[in-house]
Image: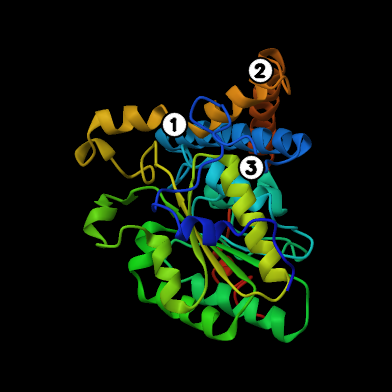
Amino acid sequence: MTQMSTDWAAEWAAGDGEPLRFLGPDGGLVRPDLPRPPDDLLGEALRLMLLSRALDQKCTSLHRQGRLGLYAPVLGQEAAVVGSHLAIDPATDWLVPASREQPAMLRHGWPLDRLLASLLGRIDAARIPDHVRMLPRQQSIASQLPHAAGIAWATAIRGLDGVTLAYCGDGATSEGDFHEACNLAGVMGVPLVLVVINNQYAISTPVSRQTRAIRLAHRARGYGFPGVAVDGDDLFAVHEVTRQAVERARAGGGPTMIEAVTYRMSFHNTSDNPSLYRDPSEEAEAGLRDPVARLVAYATGAGLMTPDAIDVVEAEVRAEVAAALDLALSYPAPGPEEIFRHVFSD
């Protein structure tokens, strides 16, 4: 098995239980000696995170206008999603999303207009292209995880080089499908990287009402593979720990669980009203750890990008979303036959 320069799971397990952090909320490096993504990758990361925010804004607005159905924003969780997905290769690896990993789905190859078509109910146009190694988003909590373990197992049986990256939320760790998938993955030693995005709430239920465990990542030990908790608002920590987990899986080392500790800065979805169950001061405090602001502060402080250059990127991604929306709206509405198309072969 390939030797790693640093075993982050072991370092975390031997520490005080606090999530690993490389980049502070002010954009400064907590430990300058730690690895960080190359500059070109940071540019891609920031663009994806800004695109995600533009998409959130547009889709929320469309929902309020009655033009789009249910939507789950990524607001506040961008570093957890983007940082982890940047560690895999869409050409060889599989993506198994939950329900709010839009920037990962886009980077993996699902065109933006097709993603928007799915939200607009244009089912036929929303079909994932054959060459894209990705399962559809999943609204049924944790039910995608046994499939993720199965894909990873099949990859290993066939002797392929691929790794499966799967996402779930903290609420999914309370479901039987989660435990069954983890047990199979551990027993068979499959090349699976499971990212648990702990955004503190399973809709309205806080983590403290879901488990007495100090950290969700500790659950990996019971299944015989490493678990590690990272600051999910820190793109650097998420990317480096996922990169090592992917390298380990690709080398035959088996699965890894990564708990990205973050915060859902918006509603669970457009049918939710978080003011009924969250203290506004809690949301304000989480805003101080904003993952996008953190990366912008680092990029500008390090001289990698200027504020004007970031303004240009923001304008570009807004235009990209608008153009994709126009294209998605041009696709025909589904007919009755769409109930069966893309589900049954005959």
Disc nearest the viewer among 3 and 1: 3
**Along the horizontal axis of the image, is 51 left or right of 283?**
right
Three-letter amino acid code at disc 2?
Asp
Q: Which residue is mark 2?
A: 311
- The residue under the point 28% across, 39% down is 274
Q: Earlier in the sequence, mark 3 or mark 1?
A: 3
Q: CA distance from mark 3 to mark 1?
A: 20 Å
Give the quarter of the figure containing the C terminus. Answer: bottom right
In the rendered image, which quarter is residue 220 located in? bottom left
Q: Secondary structure at mark 3?
A: loop
* Residue 125 appears in view: no
Disc number for residue 289: 1
Vertical relation: 218 (above or below) 327: below
In the rendered image, which quarter is residue 278 located in? top left
- The residue under the point 64% across, 27% down is 318
Crowd tier of the residue under label 3, counting other residues whose Cα lies within 10 Å: few below 14, some 14–19, many 20 or above: some
* Residue 320 appears in view: yes
Three-letter amino acid code at disc 3?
Leu
Percent x, y of residue 223: 45, 78
In this view, the residue in front, 151 or 109, is 151
Three-letter amino acid code at disc 1?
Arg
Q: Earlier in the sequence, mark 3 or mark 2?
A: 3
Disc nearest the viewer among 2 and 1: 1
Vertical relation: 261 (above or below) 146: above
Q: CA distance from mark 3 to mark 2?
A: 29 Å
Disc number for residue 34: 3
